[in-house]
């Protein structure tokens, strides 16, 4: 159906369902319950799930299929955001201008960076992309201040031209007058679900991005990319030049990152150079590996897991720990809190590190491999050969 | 035999699903519109404290947090009440705000605009805060102020000294108690003239963001009005750590005065390194080389130690002031934490009280009502003497302190001494002054 085989279509339906029902699925605990701190169904976080899902899906087309590990994708994200904010400043707050502009600008940047970086492979390629990303960051931070507004971050002022903005038009990002910040809260018993226009815009783009990625994975072009990963020399001997394919994959992943950057600016019309910093690029790599490199759904899982930890685990305070473990005997409570405290709040990176280590050591195929192992435990069928497109171990 | 279409199981299933479907609307109800974002429900109200707990301004941020916690205690009737007793308005009686107990959540801005906005957004959407207070770094304050304007939340700016916060980037939902770069220049000018004369050559090192830019512009204008020359203005990245490569060129530049438009950990590093390079022992153009730090704080003075002696700067407030409000705040802060509060702490404490008072006077948490109560509001007893919240740009006008690094501090806390209390009239400016022009408050936004 719609150009997908039955299995992929099933996967696609699952992603559609997850994306569209996220406001409900991510709020499993009633508002007043003790567990409500673990609810993730509020717009700002759901938007991040979707936006980083898109970045990592794109990144996975490059890293998962060709094996080229780019450490500079945050540069495309940042460039996309800057382009979108400039569209707000020059034309209007309608995201119909901002999002295409962000994709185009990120695409152009990826042509330049890709063309140069892809002259090398392996670790040299990684370092080149890292260098380009850091150069972009430095340019945005201080050199190109008139364009990027430096450390302050680029934002829209009341005296900007905004030539296409009519009198009394919305002064916030909107889609043909539909304010992206509009939201409806629905209460069902003790539960509360928030449906926001902005999130659904991101979700639709996530679904489109995912669909495109399946089609690329299953196409002859995708097969060629896999060939590059498995043995580039063999390709050279058969007379095929891998460069056009890797460059195309690089640009596609750059376009995905640009789209995500544009969506970020659509959710919040301000952008700063921090978005291009190398730690952001590193986070994209982490998401990709955590979820499962080279798998279809892995990127979404990885992005979700990391964003969830950065928002929820980092918000746990020592007072929360005390209230959870208050029932323990005093001496035991003190020990438990002493042990756990470094892993929550500001120390959430420690939790992330531990989870990452566990996944890489025990589930080299990422969270997807974990899911498959659980699936096998309960399946009645004899474990068959892994279906196409499933886990390929991280390199 | 023909199978009946209606199996017992089928009927039960359909019935159950249909029944549930029909019953659903009874449970569903769209959230009632209270008329503004995050209208407090029940008997508590939540406010958000968004300060840097890591990064170059972390010291200031942590001190702000201490003061904010103290303010919440006082609003809820715990402790000795602090400035509630000296405040010229007597609406706050220790029962919270409008009878609702005050709760708070905190966030770490990391001194980065992007992170600060994400943190504020989380507070607004997830925690349902009605007001955000904080800052430290004008870039962050301006970014969060813009967010609060869109979300329909009041932003009570903390430590932000850029002219832009209530100038080019002013917003109807944002209010600033702290002073700004222009005021520092206007206050420092006469003192510098008396101390250092009219023939100096100044070299500026400036933090590369809105605060640094506007403060540098203000100080340059003020010193050039005295007849000083400006040799060069060099922009340095925030959080650079090592400033030696910026300081070495000063030695042969012909400048006899160094103006450090740096703050927090950056200022501690750049001042210490300037002293290590022997700048203060030099003679240039027949004069002793001098260093000026236009914006001071106790925490920076403590960090810079010996190096700060005799260095001039300005402050919004200092705990050594002699008025009743200052004494009350310094006492309750000191009793709780064991040391006197910084200027950053004071401004955040006062902003929290001012917000609570404005809500009480307005009789509503609606941001538009609160904004109206704050606009043109005159008050006293909060440590700065008679103060005005100007309606045109939401900037407070009050006396400014000119400070000097103490030559002979008697204890660890009086590292700065007050040289002069510059009267409010001397630091006032029209709201469309060129350094503040181009701004537009817009109209107040109550959100959903």
Image: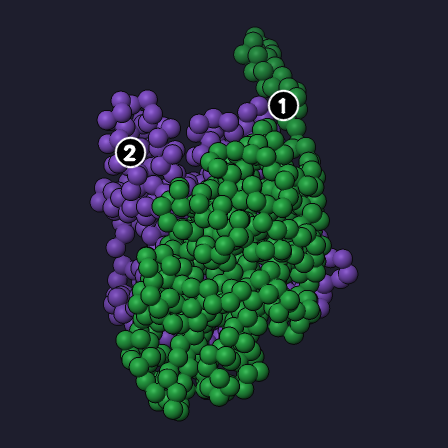
Chain colours: A purple, B green
Chain containing mark 1: B
Q: Where's residue A251, x and y in %?
A: 44, 66
Label 1 element class: helix
Which residue is located at x 64 percent, y 26 percent? B28
Quadrant of the snapshot with the C terminus of chain B? top right
Residue count near mark 2 (Cα–Cα under 10 Å), binned few <14, some 14–19, many ≥20: some
The disc placed on residue B211 is none
Question: Badge 1 is on which residue?
Answer: B27
Q: Nearer the viewer, residue A346 or B137?
A: B137
Q: Is residue A75 above or below residue A330?
A: below
Q: Nearer the viewer, residue B86 or A316?
A: B86
Which residue is located at x 60 percent, y 38 percent? B92
Q: Where's residue B277, x and y in %?
A: 29, 79
Horizontally, residue A250 falls left or right of residue B156, namely left
Residue count near mark 1 (Cα–Cα under 10 Å), binned few <14, some 14–19, many ≥20: few
Residue at the extreme left: A361
Q: Nearer the viewer, residue A30 or B334?
A: B334
Q: Is residue B269 visible?
A: no
Quadrant of the snapshot with the N terminus of chain B? top right
Q: Where's residue B400, x and y in %?
A: 55, 64
The disc placed on residue A337 is 2
- Image-quadrant location for residue B181: bottom right
């Amino acid at each position: 159906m719609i150009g997908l085989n039955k299995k992929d279509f099933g996967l696609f339906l699952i992603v559609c369902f997850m994306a569209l029902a996220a406001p409900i699925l991510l709020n499993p605990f009633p508002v007043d319950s003790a567990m409500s701190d673990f609810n993730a169904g509020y717009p700002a976080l759901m938007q991040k799930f979707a936006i980083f899902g898109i970045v990592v899906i794109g990144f996975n087309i490059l890293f998962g299929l060709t094996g080229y590990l780019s450490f500079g994708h945050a540069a495309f994200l940042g460039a996309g955001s800057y382009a979108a904010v400039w569209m707000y400043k020059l034309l209007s707050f309608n995201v119909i201008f901002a999002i295409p502009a962000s994709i185009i600008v990120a695409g152009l940047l990826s042509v330049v960076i890709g063309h140069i970086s892809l002259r090398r492979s392996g670790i040299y390629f990684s370092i080149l992309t890292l260098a380009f990303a850091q150069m972009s960051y430095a340019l945005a931070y201080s050199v190109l201040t008139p364009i990027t507004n430096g450390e302050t971050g680029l934002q829209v002022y009341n005296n900007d031209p905004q030539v296409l903005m009519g009198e009394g038009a919305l002064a916030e990002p909107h889609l043909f007058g539909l304010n992206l910040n509009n939201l409806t809260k629905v209460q069902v018993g003790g539960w509360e679900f928030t449906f926001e226009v902005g999130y659904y815009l991101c979700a639709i783009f996530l679904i489109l991005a995912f669909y495109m990625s399946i089609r690329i994975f299953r196409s002859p072009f995708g097969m060629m990319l896999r060939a590059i990963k498995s043995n580039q020399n063999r390709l050279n001997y058969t007379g095929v030049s891998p460069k056009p394919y890797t460059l195309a994959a690089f640009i596609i992943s750059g376009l995905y990152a640009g789209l995500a950057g544009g969506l970020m600016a659509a959710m919040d019309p301000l952008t700063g150079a921090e978005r291009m910093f190398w730690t952001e690029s590193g986070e994209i790599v982490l998401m990709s590996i955590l979820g499962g490199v080279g798998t279809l759904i892995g990127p979404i899982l990885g992005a979700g897991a990391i964003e969830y930890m950065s928002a929820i685990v980092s918000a746990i305070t020592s007072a929360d720990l005390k209230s959870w473990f208050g029932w323990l005997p005093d001496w035991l409570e003190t020990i438990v809190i002493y042990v756990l405290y470094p892993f929550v709040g500001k120390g959430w990176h420690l939790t992330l590190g531990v989870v990452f280590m566990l996944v890489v050591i025990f589930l080299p195929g990422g969270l997807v491999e974990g899911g498959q192992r659980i699936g096998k435990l309960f399946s009645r069928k004899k474990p068959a050969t892994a279906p196409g497109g499933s886990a390929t171990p991280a390199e | 035999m023909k199978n009946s279409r209606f199996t017992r199981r089928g009927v039960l299933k359909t019935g159950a699903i249909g029944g549930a479907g029909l019953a659903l609307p009874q449970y569903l109800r769209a959230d009632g519109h209270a008329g503004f974002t995050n209208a407090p429900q029940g008997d508590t109200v939540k406010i958000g404290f968004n300060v840097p707990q890591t990064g170059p301004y972390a010291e200031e941020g942590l001190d702000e947090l201490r003061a904010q916690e103290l303010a919440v205690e006082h609003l809820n009737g715990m402790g000795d009440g602090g400035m509630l007793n000296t405040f010229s308005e007597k609406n706050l009686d220790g029962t919270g705000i409008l009878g609702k107990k005050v709760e708070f959540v905190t966030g770490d801005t990391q001194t980065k605009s992007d992170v600060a906005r994400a943190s504020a957004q989380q507070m607004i959407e997830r925690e349902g805060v009605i007001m955000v207070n904080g800052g430290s770094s004008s870039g962050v304050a301006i970014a969060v102020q813009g967010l609060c304007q869109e979300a329909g939340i009041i932003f009570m700016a903390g430590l932000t000294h850029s002219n832009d916060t209530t100038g080019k980037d002013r917003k109807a939902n944002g209010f600033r108690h702290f002073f700004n770069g222009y005021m520092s220049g206007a206050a420092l000018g006469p003192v510098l003239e008396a101390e250092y004369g009219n023939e100096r050559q100044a070299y500026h090192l400036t933090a590369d963001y809105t605060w640094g830019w506007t403060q540098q512009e203000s100080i340059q204008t003020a010193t050039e009005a005295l007849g000083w020359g400006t040799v060069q203005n060099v922009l340095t990245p925030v959080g650079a750590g090592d400033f030696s490569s910026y300081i070495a060129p000063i030695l042969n530049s012909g400048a006899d005065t160094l103006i450090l438009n740096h703050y927090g950990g950056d200022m501690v590093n750049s001042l210490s390194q300037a002293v290590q390079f022997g700048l203060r022992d030099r003679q240039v153009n027949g004069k002793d080389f001098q260093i000026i730090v236009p914006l001071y704080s106790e925490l920076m003075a403590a960090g810079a130690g010996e190096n700060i002696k005799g260095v001039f700067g300005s402050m919004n407030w200092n705990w050594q002031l002699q008025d009743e409000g200052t004494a009350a705040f310094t006492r309750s802060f000191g009793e709780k934490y064991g040391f006197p509060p910084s200027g950053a702490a004071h401004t955040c404490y006062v902003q929290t009280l001012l917000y609570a008072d404005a809500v009480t006077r307005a009789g509503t948490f609606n941001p538009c009502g609160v904004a109206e109560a704050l606009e043109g509001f005159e008050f006293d007893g909060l440590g700065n003497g008679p103060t005005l919240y100007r309606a045109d740009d939401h900037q407070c006008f009050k006396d400014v302190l000119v400070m000097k690094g103490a030559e002979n501090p008697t204890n660890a806390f009086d590292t700065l001494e007050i040289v002069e209390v510059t009267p409010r009239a001397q630091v006032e400016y029209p709201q469309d002054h060129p350094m503040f022009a181009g701004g537009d408050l817009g109209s107040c936004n109550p959100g959903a």
